[in-house]
Image (tube, rainbow, N blue to C red):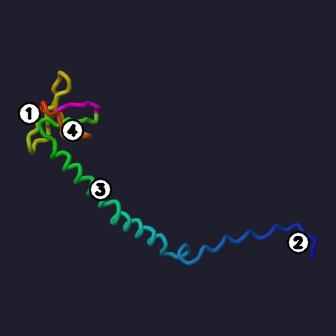
Amino acid sequence: MSFFSLFADDPAPKPPDLGWPFNSPTFPFAVIAMLFLFWIVVLRPMSRREKAEEAKKMASIKRGTKVLTNAGIVAVVVTAKEGEDEIVVKSEDSKLRIKRSVVVQILGTDDAEAAKG
């Protein structure tokens, strides 16, 4: 044993071998394929379902429906024509003309307003 070998650095430790799938050149493609499959099976049907629920909600807006807008206004629908994007709502003593898309939640019906129409 020589004098210099006593002070020599130890060789760098070898990183652990993670096995077949991780050191394969096709591993990144497999991960991308799994993410794509997840998107097809889980996320895409979920967004379709949400769009269908949104369309159903917009179609159920009629005279006398109590709604909440994205601005926080609770109002009762006065005029809602089928096929039109705008509706007229009444909140307290004011009437507003709003788009159907700003309705966030349907709170129920106002029987007094529904009886008028």
- Image position, residue 113 (x, y; %): 12, 31
Residue at x 10% of width, y 42% of height: 84
Is 75 included in the stretch rendered in magenta? Answer: yes
Which of the two labelled residues, at mark 1 and mark 4, occupies the earlier sequence position? 4
Dot 4: element = strand
Among the two numbered marks 2 and 4 on one chain, the one whose residue lies closer to the N terminus: 2
Instruction: For marks 3 and 4, give the CA distance.
Output: 25 Å
- CB under 8 Å between discs 2 and 3: no
Mark 2, other Cα within 10 Å: few <14 / some 14–19 / many ≥20: few
| Cα distance between the residues tagged 2 and 4 | 86 Å
Horizontally, is 38 left or right of 75 in the view? right
Which residue in the structure is indicated by mark 2?
5
Q: Residues within 10 Å of mark 3 (few under 14, many from 20)?
A: few
Q: Which residue is mark 3?
A: 47
- Disc number placed over residue 108 in the picture, else none: 4
Q: What is the three-letter code of the residue carrying label 2?
A: Ser
Give the residue at x 18% y 40%: 100
Residue 98 % position (x, y): 18, 34
**Magenta includes 45?**
no
Q: Which residues are magenta?
A: 71-76
As drawn, 42 above or below 73: below
Tell me: residue 63, above or below residue 41. above
Nearer the observer: mark 1 or 3; the answer is 1
Closer-to-camera residue (106/15)? 106
Helix, strand or loop for disc 3: helix
Residue type of the residue flagged with mark 3:
Ser
Mark 1 or mark 3, which has the lower sequence index?
3
Q: Quarter-wise, where is residue 48 in the image?
A: bottom left
Q: Which residue is mark 1?
A: 115
The residue under label 1 is which amino acid type? Ala
For residue 88, say whether it is visible: yes
